[in-house]
Amino acid sequence: MIAKKMQSLVNNNSVIRQMFEEGRNMAKEFGEENVYDFSLGNPNVPAPDKVRETAVMLLEKEDPLTIHGYMNNAGYPEVRKKVADSINSKFGTSFDENNIMMTVGAASGLNCALKAIIDPGDEVLTFAPYFVEYKNYVSNFDGVLNTVQTDHETFQPDLEALEEAVSTRTKALIINTPNNPTGVIYSETTIKGIADILNKKQKQYGTEIFLISDEPYRELVYTDAEVPYVTKYYDNTIVCYSFSKTLSLPGERIGYLVIPNEAADHEDLFTAVTIANRVMGCVNAPSLFQKVVAECLDEKADIEFYAKNRDKIYNALLSYGFRCVKPEGAFYLFIETPVDDKEFAAKAKSEHILVVPGSSFALGGFVRLSYCVSYETIVNSLPGFKRLSEHYELS
Amino acid sequence: MIAKKMQSLVNNNSVIRQMFEEGRNMAKEFGEENVYDFSLGNPNVPAPDKVRETAVMLLEKEDPLTIHGYMNNAGYPEVRKKVADSINSKFGTSFDENNIMMTVGAASGLNCALKAIIDPGDEVLTFAPYFVEYKNYVSNFDGVLNTVQTDHETFQPDLEALEEAVSTRTKALIINTPNNPTGVIYSETTIKGIADILNKKQKQYGTEIFLISDEPYRELVYTDAEVPYVTKYYDNTIVCYSFSKTLSLPGERIGYLVIPNEAADHEDLFTAVTIANRVMGCVNAPSLFQKVVAECLDEKADIEFYAKNRDKIYNALLSYGFRCVKPEGAFYLFIETPVDDKEFAAKAKSEHILVVPGSSFALGGFVRLSYCVSYETIVNSLPGFKRLSEHYELS
């Protein structure tokens, strides 16, 4: 009765729901404070005050027909102009409102981008480990997602492997930096290397290959590392941005796409993403929050909170003998497991520690830990991690 | 470079954009007040005060992590419970939160419903004239939309034609009442007739056929006509609701799906629509406005405004000799044209009157007029309509 394409997702969903319910049951049995749930990427730093102040001001001062009304499917022109100006001032680019489409978060932005360019059978590449939903997004348009390995010591992309992987059917490469699940930032050298390969392959095959840069974690950076602005390195770039993490607004579903003038057929491409936004049913990004984020482009949630969490858990795990790349951004640790990752995750559960097996990100032998939790959760979880380390004789 | 499936939409879009720009140019040339734009279904009655009051209260009193955070893909359970209770008290149904998924408007709800059930090649039926986006929604999942005629004197569905049209490949019938573009409400007799035919065909073919009821105009009713609640007449019903028109919030993208327990495989179906919501990138309906609408379920925008517009324009057009079914709901008139509808629309433009040819709704020989405009626009447009009537010798 359910569509065939959905059936496996429905079956798989019951496994995830089971995990979730197990967590809820553990919280009931042992008390919320005695379960250390590192499984979700849900920001736990509140939105900046200016978000509330701006939303209240708009609601009280502006015409409800304007702030809650329809606008162009791409979003309010003045909001798109402000977003463009903000990107330009931060990264030295030259965008205007015709390069920006407001979206229902980055996830919907990715879907709009893929719908605009993917024909059935087209290949999309991404580096493993990767955010598992990419596979579903590509499958929505009957594309095929294939993975390219990263260096497991640094989680920087393996460029030789990329060069081998790009085929005549490759329509796009999705990158995600700062990265979920590794927290790694792709260096300028890496971005230049990727651009060189894609340019070479475009020329060789006579094709257009899009570099889709999924950037929900762009502002969550804990070092002085630069996150290169990808449109400056490669013409056929589409940037998918979300305010979910930067402004701690994941439930509001607000983000944008950047379609540079340098992209092939950029006017048609821009029209195509706006049509995709419309026909997939989003129609437009939520109106009030378009106007809110336009006034909060220089704000960000208090990332010192995440930085403190990162240092605490990273240093503790290292001292216990765990191995893990020190994340420069996002709010995840990707920890090497001494045994099979699913086995490790199950064992961790006996310590009331919930982490996600790396195989869910197409890379076994690791687990993902989200440190967007309270500092107390981190501190209180440490004895459990210590016992895990002793159990596996890591130190 | 654009996906093949999108290419015709992109080409077609330039025609629509041309029409829109022509309208904008007319407004510039002749003055905004001298152009009578009846082409858009954009509510022009402001949201009820309680929307603003509730939103401000939530922003000022509630934890930002809760009101802007992630929740279950189906929406906040307490919001879904309130929506279920409200439907139950209005229509005598017995829904609970497990029957309700909050959506990014009705358009996204329709997409979620279709993604959950449509396999490539499946047929979806709808009655012509119909909201033209249905075709694009069905095409998203490689389904085929076929139309069934209505009686052009009443715009009630032709049930004999429906019975002939239902095939073994028919997976769904989309209905829309009160109707866009005709303003007609399907009577209880009509709904019972549809249910009888679908039940008979399900039995005959051994299939499940869903009745998808698209209800953005449910609350916009100007007579004492009842809009039957479809789940009471047919088990395999999915209701797609939107607050866009009722609360004048079209830009906020907020609505819900109803999946009744009586629907086939209803648990899997509910899981499938929530997964569809996630993988198409909406993830969840905007969080703040979920909580706002939950407190405004008994509110509605001032429909007396639309009623006054309806009476004015309908009576005037009739007195000029135009023919048109008197709409009981929504905010559209579907006017018979004395010549080809595109030709008439072009002629109307010479009177600065903008209407949409019926062929855009799969029924030529009519034009759609949206009367969600200012009363002044209606009054000022009347001499132009009178001249059109004289030109075509209607009276």
Image (spheres, coloured by chain):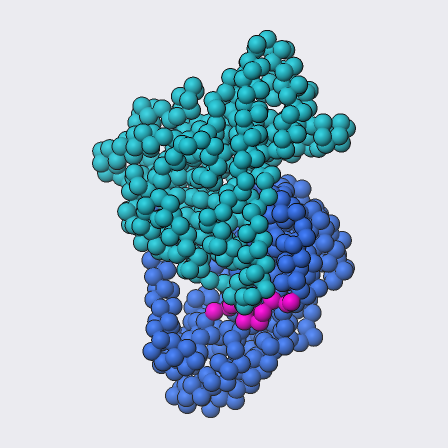
Chain colours: A cyan, B blue
Q: Position of residue A11 (x, y in %)?
A: 60, 34
Which of the 4 image quadrants contains residue A55?
A: bottom right
Q: Is residue A101 left or right of residue A349?
A: left
Relative depth, front residue between A57 and A146: A57
Q: Position of residue B61 (x, y in %)?
A: 68, 53
Q: Position of residue A210 (x, y in %)?
A: 33, 40
Which of the 4 image quadrants contains residue A310?
A: top right
Q: Is residue B206 left or right of residue A195?
A: right
The verdict on residue B43 being magenta is yes
Q: Is residue B4 left or right of residue B358?
A: left
Image point 76% across, 27% down: which residue?
A: A30
Image point 43% across, 80% down: which residue?
A: B33
Image point 54% across, 42% down: which residue?
A: A301
Q: Position of residue B3 (x, y in %)?
A: 36, 47
Q: Main secondary structure of the magenta part?
A: loop
Residue A325: tell me if it is visible.
Answer: yes
Quarter containing the C terminus of chain A: top right
Image point 34% across, 29% down: which residue?
A: A190
Which of the 4 image quadrants contains residue B226?
A: bottom right
Q: Which residues are magenta?
A: B40-49
